[in-house]
Amino acid sequence: MFKTLSALLFALPVVLGRAIDRRASVPAQCAFLLPIVDDLMDNLFENECGDAAHGALRLTFHDAIGIDPVLGGGGADGSIITFNETELAFEANDGLDDVIDTVGPFFLKHASVLSPGDFVFLAGSLSLATCPGAPQVKFSVGRPQPKAASPDQLVPEPFDNVEKILARMQAGGNFSPQEVIALLSSHSVAGADTVIPGFEGVPFDSTPSVFDTQIFVEVQLRGTFFTGPGGNQGEVMTGVQGTTRLESDHNFARSTPTDCFWQSFVNNQQLMQEQFAAAFFKMSLLGQNEEDLIDCSAVIPPAPTFTGNAFFPPSLTHSDVEQACATAAFPNLPTLPGPPEVVPPIPQADDDDS
């Protein structure tokens, strides 16, 4: 298990074109990353937008937001790997022990040439390249070794109210409400492992292997039931069987000043891609000086193209939308044919390994 790593140190399958095919465009000082890229894409993610990719993406946020002008913390420095015994004990990081167990051996393999912070954001950036529809994000190397664990209470919780989360994101990274919603695009390729006791890999929307705008559609639907017994902290009723809805997502979709930003991404793939990419890169620089880093964006391959459109899941229509934005109507979307679907759980990385 890699929960004691610090003691050693200090849905949609697709075959992808990779950095090895783009060597001519890679700066010489970034060329050392190419075999690492191939290793992570082939052996960590297995070229799929699955559980390992989802976990690596989640790890970026939980590492980077660990910074505060008063309480301290190093931001995007990889402290969540180096000081994992401390940070994995934080309530908000529940479930990340499995992620560290999955990515830990790959970090150890490449630790002689990659700092923990660089590894976290290389893995996170590459995880996006496995997910159809995801933007190609910028990536830089040169982060120094983390100096200490992040303080506790810096990672927002799904049961926190909108005002508290926005204040934390403003203090930690000077993120605007619109940037916060853009970062939540990552929930399009995510699921809950610990929100519902006894349930793992419960998707947040019906297309967890595609980086699309369905999360912004389905969270806006009227919640009618729970997946599982319900009544769990941070969870509210969902409108699509087999998915779960975070209380924080539900509130962002229905609260000023974020409800119209939330709705603006519905069926607007390009807007979501552009704003997520910008906010994600900003997050990757928290606690760092960009001038001290080397731009190695060329090693990040593009994700498979997504050409689909947003939709209402089977049996659901515009009448199931809980309209919140006061300045624009919710877009008209087609309803998929067929009976109500039950979205299957996301296969877990440890299940795949076994």
Image (tube, rainbow, N blue to C red):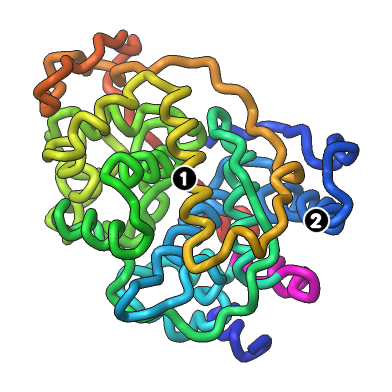
> Which residue occupies 88% across, 52% down?
28
Quadrant where the C terminus is found in the figure? bottom right
Q: CA distance from mark 1 to mark 2?
A: 29 Å
Image location (x, y in percent) of residue 210: 50, 32
Is residue 203 visible in the rendered image? The answer is no
Taking depth in this image into account, of 207 and 269 the one nearest to the observer is: 269
In the figure, is residue 288 to the left or right of 68? right
Q: Which mark, by number, is residue 258?
A: none
> Which residue occupies 56% across, 34% down?
135
Instruction: Look at discs 1 and 2 and give the one toward the viewer.
Output: 2
Is residue 23 visible in the rendered image? The answer is yes
Q: Amino acid at mark 2?
A: Leu
Q: Which residues are magenta?
A: 102-114
Q: Quadrant of residue 1?
A: bottom right
Q: Which mark, by number, is residue 346?
A: 1
Image location (x, y in percent) of residue 292: 66, 64
Task: Verify whether residue 95 appears in magenta.
Answer: no
Q: Pointer 2: what residue?
A: 33
Considering only order in the chain, which callout, 2 or 1, is on the residue closer to the N terminus?
2
